[in-house]
Structures are given as structure tokens and as C-alpha cells.
Image (cartoon, rainbow, N blue to C red):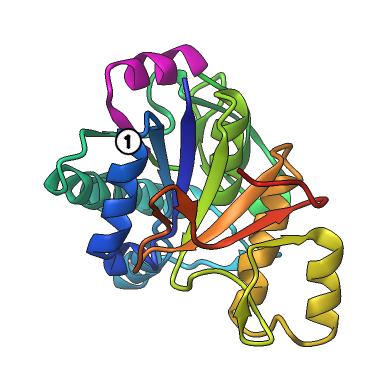
Amino acid sequence: MKSIVIKCGGSVMEDLGDSFFESLSELKEEGYQLVFVHGGGPAINKMLELYQVPHEFVNGLRKTTPEVMEVAEMVLSGQSNRKLAAMLQKQGLKALGLNGSDAGLFLGEVVDQEKLGLVGKISGVNRPLLEKLLSEELIPVITPIASTEDGTKLNVNADYAAAAVANAIDSEHCIFVTDVEGIFIDGKLSSHLDKKEIEQHIKDEKITGGMIPKVTSAMKAISQGINSVMIVSGKDAFYKNGTWIGTNVSAKKEVFN
């Protein structure tokens, strides 16, 4: 079974274009099974402000108190998940929204209770469940929420959750959807960059601004064990006539088919 894991951040979800969905349809026609993992950062921030829940970030991760966790789950499962699943359904793609904590889909462990609260890492993925859904031609749309063995809900970085799913089902590709086509160096879209090249381009200030966290997230996901991450645009086609459009990021240079 050929599969692709697609991570869609909350900030780009509003900007997904028709060409993006056309690429998804083309991949489905070629026999790829799709799995979405999504975030919801901006919407969570907005709701935390509305309910006046104190919140902060520590080393790029949202410190998750029980109050923050309650709001995050409400937004992710009740708003962001529903929205993305509905968008896929509207395009004729059979999407099924799931909470990562449902049916032991994501088994999690606390990262650092003192510093980060209920922030977790995924220690196990229910592969049989995902394979069953994919065999039914369904597209799982999953929140990055894990559950510990005692049932405690944990907030997981969506990049890491996508990497965990990709590892669990041996996906051919893990794709990060952003607001740009990929990484541009000297005005040209780079089809493939490895860790060493990225570090050098950041040092030379050829990768700057908002692209730095994108490539950093990709490299962190790769550190979770997957071979590569493809950075693509959610506004345009990222796969057309059998050709990928974006930047493949890997630990070392390998051919990306």
C-alpha cells in the first residue's frame, strides 16, 4: 500500500487552493493513500485569548496546562479537524476526522511535566487502525493529540505527529504544507536540500525570515526517524503530471522519486 502523510498547519488551512486539491486527487488516482495530520495554532491562540487563559511558549512548544489542553482539544477536534475534513469532502475526497487520542491511535508520553506541562511525544501509533481505514479508501484527518496509558490527553507538536505516522505506516513521502512553493535559494526553487546545505544557507542568509522555522521543523521531523520531508505550497499544485513541485529536505542527499 503506497501512502503519503500530509501535515497541514492551522495557519495555512484557510488558504488551501483548488490546485492543491487537484494534486491530492491526482495522487489518489495513482494509487496513493493519504493521511492528514493538522495543527490549529492561530485558532487555539484566539480561543485562549477569548477565554483569558494564560499561555506561553517554551523553546517553540506551547506550555500546556490542563486549562490550555482543554481549549486546545476543543479547537483542534471541534473546529480545525471539522473544517479540514469538510474541505476534503467538498472536493470529493472521503475524509474521516479523528482525534489522535481516539482508539489508542496515538499513544503518548509526557516530555517534561515541570517545564512544558501536558506536552507529549508519540510512543506508539495504532497501525492496524490506520491500515483498516486506508483499505476502505478513507482519508484519516488526525489531530495531534495523544493519550497516555492512563488516559491523560497530551498536546503533541503536529510536525512530530506527522513524522510518527509516516514511520508507523512506512509512508513513501511526508509532506509539510506551507504558504510557499518550497525553499528558494538565489531566487530559484531548490528541489532538494540536505541538512548541511540548509545550515550553510542559513549562515549565508540565503534562508531567512519565515522560511527558517519551516526548514527547522522539517529537520526536527527528520530527527524523529523519517528519511525526508517535502515542503510544498497549499495554494498551488504540488504534484502535477507525475512531477513533484517543492523542496525535498533530507539529512543527506538521496534521490526523491
Please report the bounds of the magenta region as a residue range.
127-141
Determine whether 249 is above or below 255 in the image.
below
Q: Answer whether residue 81 is magenta in the image.
A: no
Q: Is residue 117 left or right of residue 129?
A: right
Foreground pick, 16 / 1: 1
**Amino acid type of disc 1?**
Lys
**Residue 39 placement: quadrant:** bottom left
- Residue drawn at x 49%, y 61% as measured from the top left: 245
Looking at the image, residue 211 sits to the left or right of residue 154; the answer is right
Quadrant the C terminus occupies:
top right
Q: Secondary structure at mark 1?
A: helix
Q: Answer above or below: position of 237 versus 257.
A: below
The mark total stands at 1
Q: Closer to the camera, 239 or 65? A: 239
- Tell me residue 56's x, y (percent): 57, 68
Q: Residue at x 80, y 78 (%)?
A: 201
Residue 243 visible in the snapshot: yes
Look at the magenta stretch and give its main secondary structure: helix
- Foreground residue, 102 or 15? 15
Looking at the image, the residue that sits furthest to the front is: 241
- Can I make out residue 113 in this image? no
Question: Is disc 1 surrounded by few (<14), some (14 to 19) or many (20+) residues within 10 Å?
Answer: some
Position in image of residue 6 (x %, y %): 45, 46
Q: Is residue 116 left or right of residue 42?
A: right
Magenta region includes residue 134:
yes
Q: Position of residue 208 (x, y in %)?
A: 68, 84
What residue is shown at x 37% (from left), y 46% (from top)? 73
Q: Which residue is mark 1?
A: 28
Residue at the image position 78 percent from the left and 59 percent from the top: 194
Question: Horizontal and vertical percent for residue 59?
Answer: 71, 64
